[in-house]
Each structure stands twice: as structure tokens, then as C-alpha cells.
Image: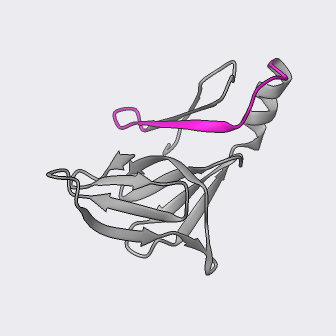
Amino acid sequence: MTTDGGFLIMSDGTNVLTYLNPDGYKVARKLNVTQNGYAVDYLNELEFIKGYIYANVWVKNYIVKIDTASGNVVGILNLTPFFEEAKNINPGIDVMNGIAYDSISGNLFITGKMWPHIYELDFYH
């Protein structure tokens, strides 16, 4: 889940993001996420950053940047180098699945299951 300041935005693991009214949790809208006309499934770990929704794609090493009006993926952040570094340190790691945004510094934090580190990315500078 994340919030845009007005609604709670929830992923159910499909390509659909659900906007909930925080008063009573009634569905306000649903947003179908697509890339080049195809559904982007397995959305996980959401963050609302500067008007866009960023979502980790389950079992992938990337985060998609989603336009909140259209649901179109407008960018992809490939995090494979971080996965590979973490795997070199701890061969037993699993998928990337943690993202967090620090609105004060503008940095993004990423990690995964059993990763040895939390990586801090200078996201907007």
C-alpha cells in the first residue's frame, strides 16, 4: 500500500491498483497498469513519489514507474546490479521486494528477502 495524500492505493499482486477512500475503505477507483498495451502483473511494494506510483514487480529485479492518470508504465529502474552484488555476498538471498522513499532526502531505499544490505539510491539528483 501507499498513499497519494487523498487515497490509500493498494496492490493485490495483479496489474490492478485499487484506490480506497480512507474513510470506510470504499473503492474509489481502479487503475489497470500496462506497458505497451500489455498488463504488468505481480505489482508489489508501492511508493507514491512526486505524482507517480513506483512498484516493485514480484520476482523481477526492477521497479516500474506508473502514470497515475493512465496506468501506463513510463519508466523502469533496473536493479539487477544490486541483486547481483547482494547475491555475491550472500548466495542464499531471494527476490528483491523492499522499496521505501525518503521524501526529505529524495532517496530511495531498496532491499530483498535475506539481502545483506539496504541500498540507498540518490533518486532525483
Q: Tell me which segment is drawn in magenta.
A: 90-106
Total numbered labels placed on residues in the image: 0
Which residue is drawn at the image coordinates 49% and 52% (left, top)?
54
Identify the residue at the far left of this view.
23
- The picture places residue 12, in percent across and down from the top left corner, at 48, 54
Color encoding of the figure: one colour
Answer whether residue 110 is magenta in the image. no
- The picture places residue 118, in percent across and down from the top left corner, at 60, 24
Answer whether residue 91 is magenta in the image. yes
Image quarter of residue 31: bottom left
Which residue is drawn at the image coordinates 61% and 81% (left, top)?
37
Which residue is drawn at the image coordinates 70% and 43% (left, top)?
79
Which residue is drawn at the image coordinates 61% and 56% (left, top)?
42
The reply, left or right, for residue 3 in relation to residue 14 is left
The reply, left or right, for residue 75 in relation to residue 92 is left
20 or 100: nearer the eye?
Answer: 20
- The picture places residue 63, in percent across and down from the top left corner, at 60, 51
Residue 43 vertical placement versus 85 (above, below): below
The reply, left or right, for residue 107 in relation to residue 96 is left
- The picture places residue 93, in percent across and down from the top left corner, at 76, 26
Residue 19 vertical placement versus 85 (above, below): below
Image quarter of residue 19: bottom left
40 or 53: nearer the eye?
Answer: 40
